[in-house]
Amino acid sequence: MLIGVGLGPGDPDLLTLKAVNALKDSDKVYVPGKMAEELVKPYNDSEILDFPMLRDYDVLNEIWKKNADIIANEARNGTVVFGLIGDPNFFSTFTHLKRVMHKYYPDVETATVPGISSITSFASRTDSEIDSSFEVSDGSDKKSKIVLKAKHTQDIIRNLTEEGYEDFIFAERLFLDRERIIKGKEDIPEKGNYFSIIYAEKGEK
């Protein structure tokens, strides 16, 4: 199994307990750089894999495939952690690695442990109080949307469909008892609650 573990913004005190336990329990830990290596060091040894910041996707795909080759056999036979700064599901090296793993090694199960992201770190350090809708962008086209407190699910899905969104996930009470995750709008319930979230994604053009 391969687990992407968020190590937070860089402060060693901001690793979650779940992240620490995953690091301690893993058979092998890989990281993309020195900062992540230092954060992992108190809990396990780690090996740095090269993930250069390039825009040449042909070269990048070769590098991601090479790293996936390194990880695959170990992840089949044990638990491998890939630890990275921030959160593994937001603008993350792990996202690219996971896609390559699924393409070439679909038998390797993957999972993630969330970490404190740059978005929440920013709000904390700048004393920014965000209590209404906001947009996060890295300059690329907007392909997804998250709706919190999704009580009127069908109205939300109808409106998002009109905006061009096609794929939907409903999640409720994440990491709590009675957690629900439903993929596909056909099976999403009529009503949600305060702990309900809808994730919408536009199809590839």
Image: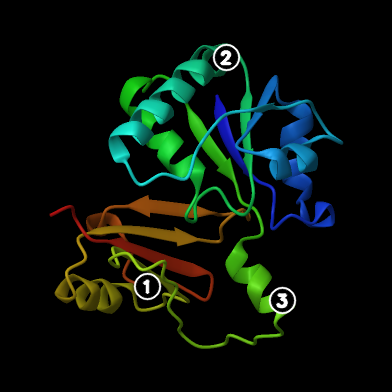
Q: Which residue is mark 2?
A: 74
Q: Position of residue 146 (x, y in %)?
A: 40, 69
Badge 3 element? helix
Mark 2: few, some, or many residues within 10 Å (few <14, many ≥20)? Answer: some
Task: Return the x and y of residue 191 as percentages of the image width and height.
Answer: 37, 72
Q: Residue furthest left?
A: 205
**Residue that badge 1 annotates:** 191
CB atoms of marks 3 and 1 within 8 Å: no
Q: Nearer the viewer, residue 110 or 197?
A: 110
Binning the other alpha carbons within 10 Å of mark 3 as few (below 14), some (14 to 19) or many (20 upward) gives few
Residue at image coords 45%, 59%: 171
* Type of the residue with mark 3: Ser
User: Which comes before the other along the chain, label 3 or label 1?
Assistant: 3
Q: CA distance from mark 3 to mark 2?
A: 38 Å
* Residue 14 showing in the rendered view: yes
Residue 32 position (above or below residue 162): above
Front tag of 1 and 2: 2
Q: CA distance from mark 3 to mark 1?
A: 32 Å
The kind of residue on which mark 2 rests is: Glu
Residue 101 showing in the rendered view: no
Q: Earlier in the sequence, mark 3 or mark 2?
A: 2
Residues at circles 1 and 2 in contact by the CB criterion of under 8 Å? no
Using the rendered view, name the quadrant where residue 167 is placed: bottom left
How far apart are the two marked residues, 1 and 2, measured between alpha carbons? 43 Å
Residue at the spot 67% in from the left edge and 69% down from the top edge = 121
**What label does residue 124 carry, if any?**
3
Residue 23 appears left or right of 95: right
Label 1 is placed on what type of residue?
Lys
Quadrant housing the N terminus:
top right
